[in-house]
Amino acid sequence: MTAFVMAVLMAVLMAVFGPGSLDLVAVADGGAPVLRVRVQHDQLDLPKSGKGQPPAITPAFANVGRAAAPGTIVMSIVVNDVNKGVTLPASFSNCFYGRERTSAYCEFPGGLEPGSAYETNAPFRAHNKNCCQVHGTYDYDVWPIGSPPDGPPEDYRHTFDRGRGPELGLQPVDARTIKGNHGVMNFETRDFKIPTDWAIKGVTLRGAVRTYAEAAIDTPTVSYGSGGPEEVRVELPEGTSIAIPGPDDPYPSEIQFRVPRPVSCRPRHSAPRPSPSQRS
């Protein structure tokens, strides 16, 4: 508190209570809660068996700050895998699961006192729908409800599905073992390699006569770490043609296509949609 602010405060108090003896007691604010998570060990030598299941992960967190984290503690957990077949089973009734079942938010009421640390009383174990390898990551974070680390979280109570089964509980652990800022576990099947898939997948165009329709053309899946196909031929449906980009097309061409006359097209990214005259 600065001398100026103290002087103003004294003047206000004198005006309220009048002259005389007045004792002021300084009270520390106690700091703030600081949440940490367990540093997880990567699992990069999983056996090739069955569907190639991801490992289990048991999240843990602690309050290493000087003040309690009041209310409810929220934990988010996400699983990602290059095969796109790995999901989280909706096993716990105090967790809310996204529609793709790759993310969940779990709630633990009661707050978190300074120096306290807990781990979940049951692990998360993602399931693999595909065969027979995995190559992915678990990520998790915790925060007091209403104070997410990276801005407001998704409105999971309204947009996610509540899990089934028992509640996910907590059990105490040694706070000295909890030192991480972000919970991460990488996992991988031994000698991992994505099997090559040269299957041809058709695309359906929808639109009206004299209008433009956009379609994403998938390329074959190749082994992890190797290059893709050098050439992909696309046969257009009868009565359609490729729209040639205009001279003011703001998106540079990245791939050349051979059509009745030269025309360049490009992969679609998360960029603004061009006007009809600029589409390809």
Image (cartoon, rainbow, N blue to C red):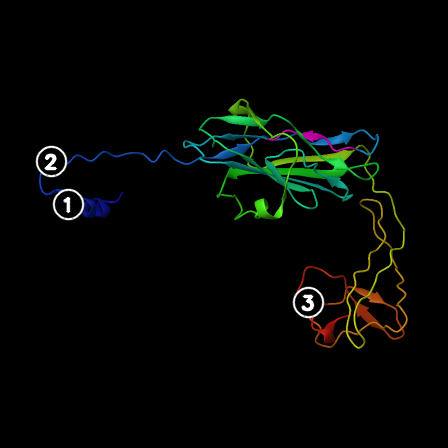
Identify which residue is drawn at 36% across, 33% down. 30
Q: How many marks?
A: 3
Q: Tell me which label, 1 or 3, sits earlier in the chain.
A: 1
Q: Tell me which label, 3 or 2, sits earlier in the chain.
A: 2
Foreground residue among 7 and 55: 55
The residue carrying mark 3 is: 273
Q: Amino acid at mark 3?
A: Arg
The correct choice, above or below, for 177 with respect to 84 in the image is above
Identify which residue is drawn at 43% across, 32% down. 68
Residue 265 position, x and y percent, is 79, 67
The correct choice, above or below, for 269 with respect to 28 in the image is below
Q: Which residues are magenta?
A: 53-59
Q: Amino acid at mark 2?
A: Ser
Residue 60 position, x and y percent, is 58, 29
Label ID, residue 21: 2
54 inside magenta stretch? yes
Q: Nearer the viewer, mark 1 or mark 3?
A: 1
